[in-house]
Image (cartoon, rainbow, N blue to C red):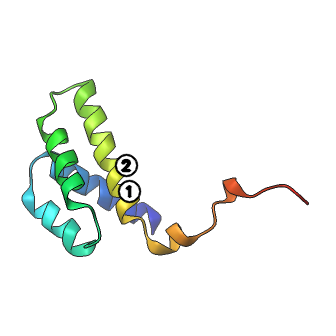
């Protein structure tokens, strides 16, 4: 299930970086709480960045934003095991 979610994010990232407006509409429809202004800005940065390290950096930023903004609720609410203390 998580792999499907990550693949969906990768497809959205690629479509947004190519300038596909329908991807933006799909994301907003599925996740109405998403920060649309930031999404548009990151998509624009990825689309306009020149090939090479700048484009890779911009698409990574877009991916990280999408991953954080669309993370399944159950996963968001789960305790982070890395924060668990060893006080026993």
- Asked whether, in this view, residue 81 is left or right of residue 42, the answer is right
Extreme top residue here?
52
Disc 1 secondary structure class:
helix
Extreme right residue here?
88
Q: Percent x, y for residue 32?
A: 25, 73
| Disc 2 residue crowd, few under 14, some 14–19, many 20+, Cα 10 Å | few
Q: Quadrant of residue 86?
A: bottom right
Residue 64, label in figure: 2
Rendered position, 64 above or below 49: below
Residue tagged 1:
67
- Asked whether, in this view, residue 23 is left or right of residue 75, the answer is left
- Asked whether, in this view, residue 29 is left or right of residue 74, the answer is left
Q: Quadrant of the N terminus?
A: bottom left
Residue contact at pointers 1 and 2, CB within 8 angstroms: yes
- Asked whether, in this view, residue 85 is left or right of residue 22, the answer is right
Residue depicted at 15% across the width and 27% down the height: 50
Residue depicted at 91% across the width and 60% down the height: 88
The Cα atoms of the two marked residues, 1 and 2, are separated by 5 Å
**Closer to the camera, 14 or 41?**
41
């Amino acid at each position: 299930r998580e792999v499907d979610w990550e693949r969906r994010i990768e497809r959205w990232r690629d479509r947004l970086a190519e300038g596909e407006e329908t991807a933006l509409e799909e994301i907003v429809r599925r996740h109405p709480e998403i920060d649309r202004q930031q999404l548009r800005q990151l998509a624009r940065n990825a689309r306009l960045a020149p090939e090479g390290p700048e484009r890779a950096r911009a698409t990574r930023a877009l991916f990280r934003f999408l991953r954080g903004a669309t993370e399944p609720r159950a996963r968001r609410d789960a305790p982070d095991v890395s924060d668990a203390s060893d006080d026993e």
